């Protein structure tokens, strides 16, 4: 069973509503719990700890793929990835290890593939709000120097770190925000643009 399915099953066992679980675990609404249980939203490690406490169990139990319908099974080994969280800084030194400020554990079941290298960064600002990404959300990227057209990626451009959607246009590449307040960056010389990673999952702050 998936993390979302386990959370739902345990919540129903305890006879509490999605709204009550949201309140106990620090989320603002029942709809967020519904998205988590439907595996539409990921869960940051610190939030998973709160959900586990609210459900009177452990994160390992919630992450177990071996939970059966009528038995709460603790996992001896949980298949997770340890991912560094990187401080938001501009410039070429973005990926230096001294900018790693934390680590998070992510179940591999949340990832499409077992990528060789992942990193995470907290979203700053509202440039992606129309993508459902808010200030403070944790974004997990696959490290790569090639972002597929149409995908969200993290880029180094003009000595700035930008999280934008990559779009090809007649006048060059565009780095497009998901908020009309922010104009697209027009990349006329592709040599000036350096891709750092492509977005894999988002972990909502609330």
Image (cartoon, rainbow, N blue to C red):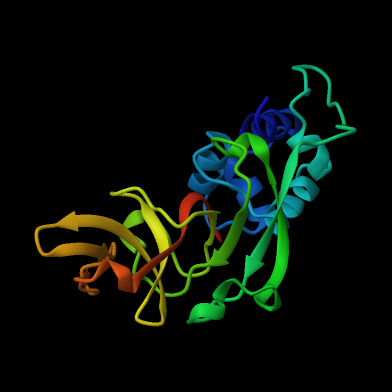
Residue 176 on image: x %, y %: 26, 63
The quadrant holding residue 159 is bottom left
Residue drawn at (48%, 81%), measured in percent from left and top? Answer: 90
The quadrant holding residue 36 is top right
The quadrant of the picture occupied by the C terminus is bottom right
In-image side of 161 versus 184 (left or right): right
Residue drawn at (61%, 53%), measured in percent from left and top? Answer: 118
Please determine whether, in this image, residue 126 is positioned above or below residue 89.
above
Residue 77 on image: x %, y %: 86, 34
Nearer to me, 163 or 156 = 156
Nearer to me, 93 or 24 = 93
Residue 109 on image: x %, y %: 64, 34
The quadrant of the picture occupied by the N terminus is top right
Residue 170 appears anywhere in the view: yes
Nearer to me, 117 or 43 = 117
Residue drawn at (35%, 48%), measured in percent from left and top? Answer: 148
Residue 184 appears anywhere in the view: no
Nearer to me, 109 or 93 = 93
The quadrant holding residue 44 is bottom right
In-image side of 114 versus 180 (left or right): right
Residue 166 on image: x %, y %: 29, 57
């Amino acid at each position: 069973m998936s993390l979302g399915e386990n959370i739902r099953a345990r919540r129903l066992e305890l006879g509490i509503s999605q709204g009550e679980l949201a309140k106990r675990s620090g989320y603002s609404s029942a709809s967020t719990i519904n998205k988590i249980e439907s595996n539409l939203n990921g869960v940051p490690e610190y939030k998973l700890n709160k959900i586990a406490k609210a459900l009177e169990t452990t994160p390992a139990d919630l992450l177990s793929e071996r939970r059966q319908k009528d038995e709460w099974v603790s996992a001896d080994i949980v298949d997770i990835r340890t991912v560094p969280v990187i401080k938001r800084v501009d410039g070429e030194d973005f990926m230096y290890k001294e900018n790693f400020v934390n680590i998070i554990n992510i179940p591999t079941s949340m990832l499409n593939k077992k990528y060789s290298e992942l990193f995470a960064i907290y979203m700053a600002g509202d440039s992606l709000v129309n993508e459902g990404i808010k200030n403070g959300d944790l974004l997990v990227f696959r490290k790569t120097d090639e972002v597929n057209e149409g995908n969200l990626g993290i880029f180094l451009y003009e000595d700035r770190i930008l999280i934008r959607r990559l779009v090809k246009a007649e006048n060059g590449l565009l780095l497009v925000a998901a908020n009309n307040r922010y104009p697209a960056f027009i990349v006329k010389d592709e040599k000036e643009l350096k891709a750092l990673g492509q977005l894999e999952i988002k972990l909502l702050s609330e």
